[in-house]
Image: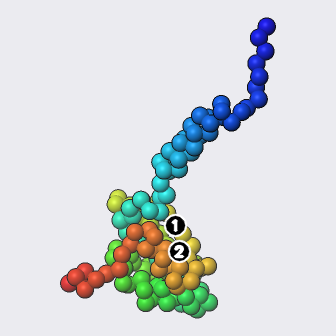
Amino acid sequence: MHQYDFRFSKVNMAPVIVVIFFVAVALATSHVDSTTTNQYASARVESCSGCRLTQLPDVKQFIFEDLPNYNNVEFKHIPGAVPKLLLFNENEEEVERLPLSSLTREECNNLLISKGFTKKTAKDEI
């Protein structure tokens, strides 16, 4: 019988390593993060307008000062509701729901921007 030597050497491992590398690169580049490619048609922030927000000054400022400056984003007052961001597709179906309570004002703004929402310009106001 013929006996096989299963020890790996640098010479015969090189092609295997190259193949593994290219497979890993292909998988990494084919997976695209949904936060950068998913186009949301609109968004809505739902929250109470006072009681819970008094304990979350950053979120309160974001809702009442920053949110009106974004295109296709609205605020809906729901008594007693914890602040959350709802994201909708072009068919007005809810796609994602994210809590805002633990975020700073800057993080709330960055979240909207990362989801593809833009701030209104003077041209949008007309």
* Mark 2: few/some/many CA within 10 Å (<14, 14-19, 20+): some
Q: Position of residue 78 (x, y in %)?
A: 50, 79
Q: How many numbered circles are shown?
A: 2
Which residue does the numbered mark 2 point to in the structure image? 84
Instruction: Decide if residue 59 is on the left or right side of residue 70.
Output: right
Q: Residue furthest front?
A: 11
Depth check: give the residue in front, 110 or 46: 110
Q: Is residue 98 visible?
A: yes
Q: Is residue 54 above or below residue 8?
A: below
Instruction: Decide if residue 103 is on the left or right side of residue 43.
Output: right
- Which residue occupies 53% across, 74% down? 84
Label 2, label 1: how many angstroms apart (C-alpha)? 7 Å
Q: Is residue 100 above or below residue 30?
A: below
Q: Position of residue 80 (x, y in %)?
A: 57, 81
Which residue does the numbered mark 1 point to in the structure image? 97
Q: Mark 2 touching mark 1, by CB under 8 A?
A: yes
Q: Secondary structure at mark 1?
A: strand
- Which residue occupies 48% across, 86% down? 62
Instruction: Decide if residue 27 is on the left or right side of residue 121.
Output: right
- Which residue occupies 22% across, 82% down? 123
* Mark 1: few/some/many CA within 10 Å (<14, 14-19, 20+): some
Along the polypeptide, which appears first: circle 2 or circle 1?
A: 2
Q: Position of residue 94 (x, y in %)?
A: 45, 62
Residue type of the residue flagged with mark 1? Arg
Q: Quadrant of residue 20?
A: top right
Residue type of the residue flagged with mark 2? Lys
- Which residue occupies 59% across, 87% down? 56
Q: Secondary structure at mark 2?
A: strand
Q: Residue furthest left?
A: 126
Task: Please identify the quadrant where the N terminus is shown.
Answer: top right
